[in-house]
Structure formats: structure tokens, C-alpha cells
Amino acid sequence: MISVDLIAGARPNFMKISPIIDAINAAAGEGKAINFRLIHTGQHYDKNMSGSFFEQLGIPEPDVNLGAGGGTQAEQTAAIMIGYEKLLMEGNKPNLCLVVGDVTSTMACTITAQKLHVKVAHVEAGIRSGDWSMPEEINRMVTDSITNYFFTTSEVANESLRKAGVEEERIFYVGNTMIDTLLKHRPRFQKPEVWDKIGLEKGKYIVMTLHRPANVDQEEKLKELIQEIIDHSGGLPLIFPVHPRTKKMLQNLGISHERLHMIDPLGYLEFNFLVESAKAVVTDSGGITEETTVMGVPCMTLRDNTERPETITEGTNELLGTDPKAIKPSMEKLFSGNWKKGQIPHLWDGKTAKRIVDILLQKLG
């Protein structure tokens, strides 16, 4: 029987792994068996950042939790590698280690698997921002340099892999598993407490998320960014689920405003309920730009680059950069009704995980 380790370690991973588990289970129902072991590295260990995702997305309890916990990049990488290496060396090596996305767990388990002669498949391979200051970019590059099978979300990703010398027969353009999850659970989105608490109305508020070091690690820059958003958001409420990293900075700055509602991180179903009904989203997250593109919600990305250019060329996303002064003209464009409508990229159709599992059965069977 084919055996596969599915690696999940941080909040974005769970959305990408969930439909793959569904597709494996569906294939088993048709007599095509893949034996999988779900491994939670413990990279995100806060319940709001990981635990609730397992419940809401119907992901089974992990077979193994490596319990890596927090620490520096190096400490976390080392803890994951030590934990996964021990697991593999105890026996029952899989035919394949399947990693998703670009977090520390992705890179750490890829290196560990390859050194113990376990093949690796990378879901969301080939995406690049070109920004080496982002840990995620290093994770992507290292992972893709030693991956066996590349599952991609776009033709841009395919091309970056070809330029790196990856043979065509190892590149599989399958679509986006995160969109599989979004489309499956969209009818189940749940109204968060904040909705009734402050009387939110569809299309009459803005959602914010900020967590990248370039935006939140410099106190004055963060303060100016938030002030510009407050000043130019058309008098609308601003709903800001605060990442733990950002919360610490905001407490030091003492930022507050009657329209700025800073709340704890939300579960998947509650957060996307907010996004779907928002006037717009202001973010520095890559994954959210994909979800807003599919839901047709205007999105402003506070970054100088993106690894998901299709959300700009085809979707509803615009790259503003990190200069706070870019917020005013973008908000003016939004409120004048001139924001682009966008379209859904090719193969972002909810069937990506099935394509992946079909390919795994063909390659490993």
C-alpha cells in the first residue's frame, strides 16, 4: 500500500491539507488506497492559531504531534527536524512526505525526509516573491531545490520552476487546495461575535490583518500605517483580528480609535464570514489575497512584492507597497467605485486535491 506523511505545522497549512485528506478518503472509497499519517509539527501551538482549524475544517486528530513550539527560526527548524527524524528512524518510513506552503515546517520536514531517502512532494511549489528578507521565501527556495514532485497553483509558478531547471515531467499544474477548502466551507461560514456586538452590516466595514516584520516591527511605521487607514477609511468600522506578534507592538504604542476594533484571531469560518461581507480587506498576508480574489472582495496588500501575482493580474488584489502614503489614493479608488472586478484564476475550482491524489496514485502505485 502507498504510504504518505502529510505535514501541517502552521495555520495556513491546515487549509491546504484538509482537502487532500478528503480526496485520499474519497479515493479509498473507490478502492484506491493511500495510507496517510497526519503529522502536526506544533509550529503553531496556540488554539486560535491551529486547534480550532482542526475542528472547523473536519481534519482528523493528528497521528503525531512533534510539539516543536516557539523560539527563533533556527530553534523551531531544529526542533521540527529532530522530531521528524526520530519518527522516521523509528521505522515505518512512508513512500512520500507531502509538504504544503512555505512555513518553517515545510522546509524542515523536506530536508529531513530527503536525508533519510524519502521522496518529497511540494503543494504550492514554485511561487516566488524575490524578497530574500522574508523567511518564507528562503523556505520556498530550499524546499523546491530538493523536491521530487511539484504541485503548482499558476503558470507563473510553473515558469519559475522551469527557469530553475526542473524537468517538465515533475511539474503538475493542479490549482489551489486552499480554494478547495474555501469553496467547500463557504456555505458554513459563521457570524463572529463582533458582528452583532458592534452592529456590522454587509459592505459597510473594512477587515485588516498585519503581521509581517516590515509592517509591524518598526513602531513609528506601524503607528503611521494604522493612522492612515483610520483617516481614509470613509468613516467605516475597521475590524482587526490581531496576530500575537502584532498585539505586542500595539500594546506598546497605545493605539486606539472608536472605529478600530482589535479582536483576537478568529477561526476559519468566522474570519471568512467577515471577509466575504467586507467593503474591502487591507492585509500583508499572501493567502488572504487568494481568498478575496475568489470571493470578489477588493484587497489592498501592504507589501512591496507578492508571490501570488495572479491575484493582481487576474484577481481583486492591488499591491500598495509599505509606504503609508499609498493608502489614501487606494481608499479613494475604492470609495469612488473604481476598484477592479477581477476573475478567478484557472483551475481554482475546488477540484485541486483530487488532481493531486490522482497523480500520487499514478506515480507511487
Image (spheres, rainbow, N blue to C red):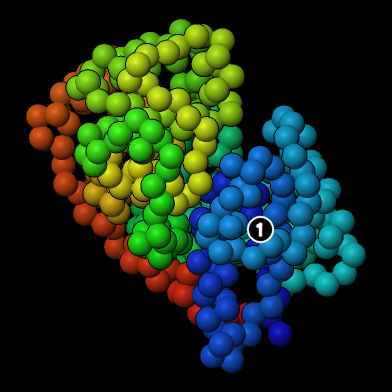
At x 46%, y 7%, the residue is 220
Which residue is drawn at the image coordinates 24% and 49% (left, top)? 296
Determine which residue is flagged by label 1.
Answer: 7
In the rendered image, residue 334, in percent from the top left (x then y), is placed at 17, 31
| Whole-percent x, y for residue 219 in the image | 50, 10
The C terminus: image quadrant: bottom right
Quick check: can you spot residue 257? yes
Identity of the amino acid at label 1?
Ile
Q: Quadrant of the N terminus?
A: bottom right
In the foreground, 77 or 205: 205
**For numbered disc 1, what is the local secondary structure?**
strand
Number of numbered callouts drawn: 1
Q: Is residue 26 above or below residue 38?
A: below
Residue closest to the far right:
90
Residues 309 and 130: in front is: 309
Task: Determine which quarter of the picture holds residue 88.
Answer: bottom right
State the residue lying farthest toward the bottom: 31
Q: Nearer the viewer, residue 307 or 22?
A: 22
x then y, percent, for residue 141: 57, 45
* 301 lies above or below 33: above
Q: Is residue 302 above or below residue 287?
A: above
At horizontal 42% and vertical 29% (from top left) the residue drawn is 240
Q: Residues within 10 Å of mark 1 (few under 14, many from 20)?
A: many
Residue 299 horizontal side relative to residue 83, left or right: left
- Residue 144 visible to the viewer: no
Name the residue at 52% across, 36% down.
265
The picture places residue 199, in percent across and down from the top left corner, at 30, 34
